Amino acid sequence: MIDISICIPVYNTERYLRRCLDSIEPALFGFTYGTWEIIVVDDGCDDRYTCESIASEYEFTRIIHHESN
């Protein structure tokens, strides 16, 4: 069971995603009690493959693609 989940919604913000993940991940590595994850929620951005590529570089990170209506 995951103790902490951080959800990051993205929509055409690929250029900021790496900086965002870089700022979150070091703080979570200091978290010694329990488990954690980062969830990047792509709400139908134009370049979903860039988001997928960036998110795959970070441990404990997964991406969910959601098509906007």
Image (tube, rainbow, N blue to C red):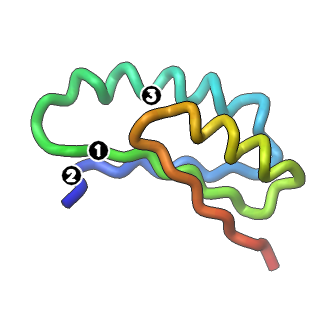
User: Marks 1/3: CA distance?
Assistant: 11 Å
Residue at image position (82%, 55%) is: 45
Q: Residues within 10 Å of mark 1 (few under 14, many from 20)?
A: some
**What residue is shown with label 1?**
36
Viewer-proximal residue, 55 or 3? 55
Residue at image position (58%, 29%) is: 20
Q: Dividing the picture into quarters, in which one does residue 28 lie?
A: top left
**What residue is shown with label 2?**
3
Q: Is residue 3 above or below residue 14?
A: below
Viewer-proximal residue, 63 or 4? 63
Q: Amino acid at mark 1?
A: Trp
Q: Are marks 1 and 2 in contact (CB under 8 Å)?
A: yes
Residue at image position (23%, 21%) is: 30
**What residue is shown with label 3?**
24
Q: Quadrant of the C terminus?
A: bottom right
- Report x, y in % for residue 26: 38, 20
